[in-house]
Amino acid sequence: MHNSQLVDPFGRRITYLRLSVTDRCDFRCTYCMGEDMVFAPRAQILSLEELYAVADAFIGLGVRRIRITGGEPLVRKNLLSLLARLGRRAELEDLAITTNGSQLAELAPQLRAAGVARLNISLDSLRRERFAAFTRRDRLEQVLAGIDVARAAGFRRIKLNTVVQKGRNDDEVLDLLEFAMAHGLDISFIEEMPLGDISSHSRQATFCSSDEVRERIAQRHVLVRSGRATGGPSRYWQVVGSATQVGFISPHSHNFCGDCNRVRVTAEGKLVLCLGHDHALDLKALIRRHPGDRECLREALQQALRLKPERHHFANDEQVQVVRFMSMTGG
Ligand code: SAM
Ligand code: SF4
């Protein structure tokens, strides 16, 4: 008899998977990647069939919410076929996508039809030059058009994601919030995380805490705590007098690990147990060594969960602890 759940050593049950379907992107956001980013060769990226096998194993172990991300997920060829398969899985309570919005004007209705319930759309500025400086692409109009098409497509919720940087867009916090309110959207303000090697700016110099963002909002709006809990790094607030919910994603200034219910799988098939650690299990090697062996994958996932760290260490710059996984062959 197998235990059919994923529970880590701290008693946290894993119900949420972030699945990256590509490392490629049509933007080059300065906080995310360099202009000359080198992407993985295609053979190293999970095929759509392999992505489905991973998702299927997680669903079998109690995952009920999947968020598709990347890179830019909507540049992945034939993504809709994977989404449609996942959309048919009755066990899933939520299928969502995080996107930069560049393809939404074309794809939003098809995403909705495939069963995607919620969208997160990244938007760091409403000003054309600034948007172009953030993303290194002059595509604000395209993204705004995509947001309009998505709003008409009947998603359950659409949320904007804004990385706030001091001196770059912190003076747009109210504009972005009011844009969200005027369009019936939610919005999350994100503290920049020290992920990946970037050379375009000093992260310390542009760091803007969620507390500062909240103070700016309080100049004009009243926020009350929302009951919504995601078991993730977002804490939600309701704008009084509006349907808009505001999230603050604060990896630096608040520790949210205690109720963390999520894991990630990269486009190359690495299972990442915590964003703040280098722990990773190579699911691709496992799947390619044992094609079609669902039991082997399932056992590997359960073993891997034993190594989910208790918490991240972004806040105090402790040296990140690295545990290398041995190749796991499972059953
Ligand atoms: N390309 C899609 C997009 O931009 O929405 C999905 C992938 S992107 C990596 C997911 C989210 O991570 C985006 O909202 C982006 O702004 C955010 N992000 C990227 N790098 C970040 C960093 N260093 N710190 C905080 N957020 C970051
Ligand atoms: Fe692309 Fe998203 Fe990274 Fe921007 S944040 S470069 S849109 S993956």
Image (spheres, grey):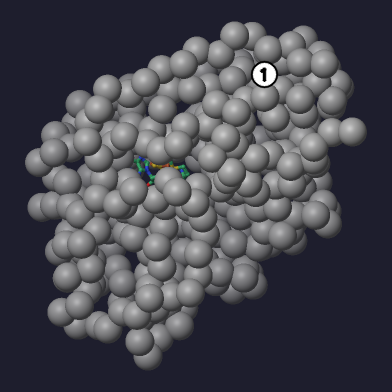
Relative to 306, residue 100 above or below: below
Relative to 142, residue 173 above or below: below
Q: Residue 52 lies in what quarter of the image?
A: top right
Relative to 291, residue 184 above or below: below
Q: Is residue 302 visible?
A: yes
Q: Furthest-right residue in view?
A: 1
Q: Nearer the viewer, residue 280 or 11?
A: 11
Q: Residue 162 lies in what quarter of the image?
A: bottom left
Horizontal and vertical percent position of residue 287:
75, 18
Total of numbered circles in the picture?
Answer: 1
Relative to 221, residue 206 above or below: above
Label 1 element class? helix
The residue drawn where x is 66% and y is 53% is: 65
Q: Furthest-bottom residue in view?
A: 241
Q: Quadrant of the C terminus?
A: top right
Horizontal and vertical percent position of residue 64:
70, 52
Residue of label 1? 284
Q: Nearer the viewer, residue 211 or 156?
A: 211
Q: Nearer the viewer, residue 193 or 172?
A: 193
Horizontal and vertical percent position of residue 269:
62, 24
Amino acid on which disc 1 is placed: Lys
The residue drawn where x is 77% and y is 29% is: 298
- Disc 1 within 8 angstroms of ligand 1 (CB): no
Q: Quadrant of the N terminus?
A: top right
Horizontal and vertical percent position of residue 116:
67, 58
* Other residues around mark 1 within 10 Å, as few (<14) / some (14–19) / many (≥20): many
Question: Where does ligand 1 appear, by image quarter?
Answer: top left
From the viewer's perspective, is 244 left or right of 223? right
Q: Is residue 140 visible?
A: no
The residue drawn where x is 59% and y is 9% is: 326
